[in-house]
Image: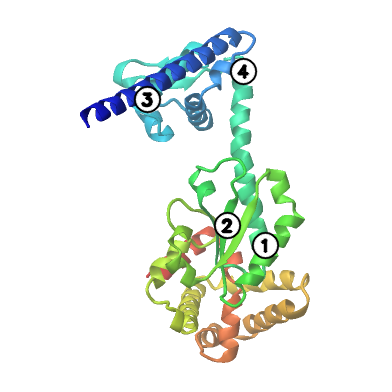
Amino acid sequence: MTLVNNNRQWSIFIDLYNYISDFIMRNQTIMKTENSTYSSLKTPLTEILGRKGHVLVLRQLLLSQESVSHSQLIKRTGLSKQGVYDTVSSLVESGLLTYNGRGRYQRIEVRTDFPLYNSIRQLFEAEKKRFENFQSELKDLADKLNPQPTSVWMFGSAAEGTDQYGDPVQLAIAGPLKKVDSIVEQFRSLILEKQIEQNVDVTVDIRGVTLADLETKPYLTKGNLIIIYGVAPSTLLESYTGRLTPKFNHEYVDAYSIDQAENWVELIQQNPSIIGRAIEYLESKISNLSGGEKKELSEWLHILKSMPIQRLKKFLMSESERSVRLRQSMPFWPILNDSERKEWRRLSNE
C-alpha cells in the first residue's frame, strides 16, 4: 500500500512538474514575442494598453482627470497593492504617467503633454459614452410605454460588470399586474424598431415581473442593479416582503395600489402643480394613441380636470371597480422632477 501511495505521489509530482515547465516555456515565448514587437516610438500602445491592469488604472485617471494616490487606485480598480504599484511604475516608464510629490504625499497623474494623450483619453470617453447612451435610449423608450412601468432595471452580469461579449443584457420590468405582459411586448417592439441591439452590438433580454416574483426570485434584486426607469425594486420589495402569497396575490396587489395612491395624494398636496403637468402630459400623449389605451387615458384626463384634490383622494383610495382599474395606470410618475421622485420614494418607504 505504501509503494502504491509513493508511486501515486510521484506521478502527481511529475504531472505538476511538466505543467509548470510547459507554462514557463509558453510564457517565455510570449514575452519574447512581446519584446520583439514593442517599440516606444512606433507601437507605444502595445505597452500602454497591452495589459488589463494598465487599462483599469488609465480608465480611472483619464476619466477623473485628477491626480490620485496609490491607495485610491487600489480601491477604485480592485487591483492588489503590488499590482497597482507595478502597473503605475510600468506606465510611468512608458511616459504616459508621472509622479507628483514624494513619500506618503506622492500622487500619480497623467501627462497631458504626452503625444497620444488626447487620443487615449477620447477612447476611454467614447467607451463611457457608449454605455451612457445605451442607458439613456432605454429610459426614453420606457417613458413611451403605456401604461407606465413602475420600474425598469438592469440585473445580472451586465449590471455587475462581469459580462462577456455575447452575454445578454438582462432587463426586468415591474408594472400593473394585469398589464405587465403588454408593457414587455411594447418595450421589445420599440427596441427592435430603434435597432438598439444592432447599434450597441448586444442582445437585450426583457422579462416582466410581479411583486410575487420579487419575493420568490431573489436574483432579480440581489447584487448591483442599474435603475433605468422608475423606482428601485428594493423600494417595492422592502415595503411588501412577506405580504404576498399565491392565495392572496390579487388582494394584496389591491392593497398595494391603495397604499401607492395614498402616497400620490400626499405628494400632490405638497406639489399641486403635478396635476397641471399631468394634464399637459396626457393631452400630448392621447393625441398619438387609439383604441383602449386612448380611452383609459382620456378617462384620467377627465378626472384630473374635473375633480378637486379632496374628491381625487377619495376616488384614488376607493374600492370601486373603476378606481381599482384606473389605479393600474396612474399618469403621474413621468412628469415628476428629481426632487419629487425622491420625496415619493421616501413616502413609499415609510
Of callouts 1 and 3, the N-terminal one? 3
Q: How far apart are the alpha carbons under marks 4 and 3?
A: 23 Å
Considering every residue shown, the one lying at the far bottom of the view is 320
- Residue 70 is marked as 3
Residue that numbered label 4 is attached to: 116
Specify few, some or many for label 4: CA neighbours under 10 Å numbering under 14, 14-19, or 20 or more.
few
Q: Nearer the viewer, residue 27 or 5?
A: 5
The x, y position of residue 31, in whole percent, is 51, 13
Of callouts 2 and 1, the N-terminal one? 2
Q: Is residue 141 above or below residue 330?
A: above
Depth-wise, is mark 1 or mark 4 nearer the camera? 1
Left or right placement of residue 118 versus residue 193 in this view = left
Left or right placement of residue 81 versus residue 129 in this view = left
What amino acid is labelled 4 in the image? Leu
Q: Is residue 137 above or below residue 313?
A: above
- Residue 171 is marked as 2
The reply to whether callout 1 and callout 4 are in contact (CB within 8 Å) is no
Q: How far apart are the alpha carbons under marks 2 and 3?
A: 36 Å
Confirm whether residue 147 shows in the render.
no
Q: How far apart are the alpha carbons under marks 2 and 4?
A: 38 Å
Residue that numbered label 1 is attached to: 187
The reply to whether callout 1 and callout 3 are in contact (CB within 8 Å) is no
